[in-house]
Structures are given as structure tokens and as C-alpha cells.
Amino acid sequence: MSVITSVTGFAAFGVLVRTYALGLQKRPLFSNPSTHVAAAAVFGAAGYFINSALERQNSLIEGKKDLLLKNRERAEEIAKQQAAL
């Protein structure tokens, strides 16, 4: 998922949540649009943070995977050397 998709998706969800909350309270939905902007900004920031966390986790997983593959190759070489003796 790209950064733009995450941020805009979460921002849209924030506006939806704010509109839903105002609807539950039976208040005018768009009387104060700055609250919608604030909700979009907060949820957009959360989307950016989640996207960054996913990218960091994926890079760590790739690093661990490479390390495990190298260790497996080294263990197989050692096992072949011991079997040849």
C-alpha cells in the first residue's frame, strides 16, 4: 500500500467518523467544517504512521529472512564437510 493511499484512506475515514458522530448527536453535519479538517488531519497522520510502521516491519522481516537463509546455507556446508570426513 502506498503512502498516498494510506493517508487519504484514513483521512476519509476520519471525516466519515466525524460526520457519523454529528449525525448521532442530531447536530448539523457541516456547520463547522474545521472539525472535519481536524479529524481528517488526525486520521491522516495515523495512516502515515501505520504505513511507516509497516514499511519498517517489512524491512526488518526481509533482513531476518536473509540472515536465516545465510545461516541455513552455512549449516548445510558444515554438514556436508562433516559428512565427507
Image: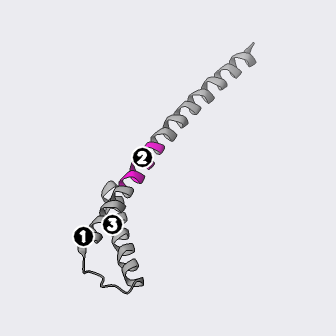
Which of marks 3 and 2 precedes in the sequence?
3
Of the pair 31 and 39, the residue shown nearer to us: 31
Give the magenta range: 48-57
Residue at 37% over, 87% down? 26
Is residue 1 visible to the viewer in this orientation of the structure? no
Tag 2: amino acid: Glu
Characterize the local packing of mark 1: few (<14), some (14-19) or many (20 or more) Cα atoms within 10 angstroms. few
Residue 3 highlighted magenta (yes or no): no
Name the residue beneath numbered marker 2. 55
Q: Looking at the picture, does residue 1 appear above or below residue 40?
A: above
Q: Image check: 54 left or right of 31?
A: right
Tag 1: amino acid: Ser
Closer to viewer: mark 1 or mark 2: 1
Overall secondary structure of the magenta section:
helix
Characterize the local packing of mark 3: few (<14), some (14-19) or many (20 or more) Cα atoms within 10 angstroms. many
Q: Quadrant of residue 6?
A: bottom left
Q: Do the CB atoms of the residues marked 1 and 2 lie less than 8 Å apart?
A: no
Name the residue beneath numbered marker 3. 39
Residue at 42% over, 53% down? 50
Name the residue beneath numbered marker 1. 34
Secondary structure of residue under mark 1: helix
Which of marks 3 and 1 precedes in the sequence?
1
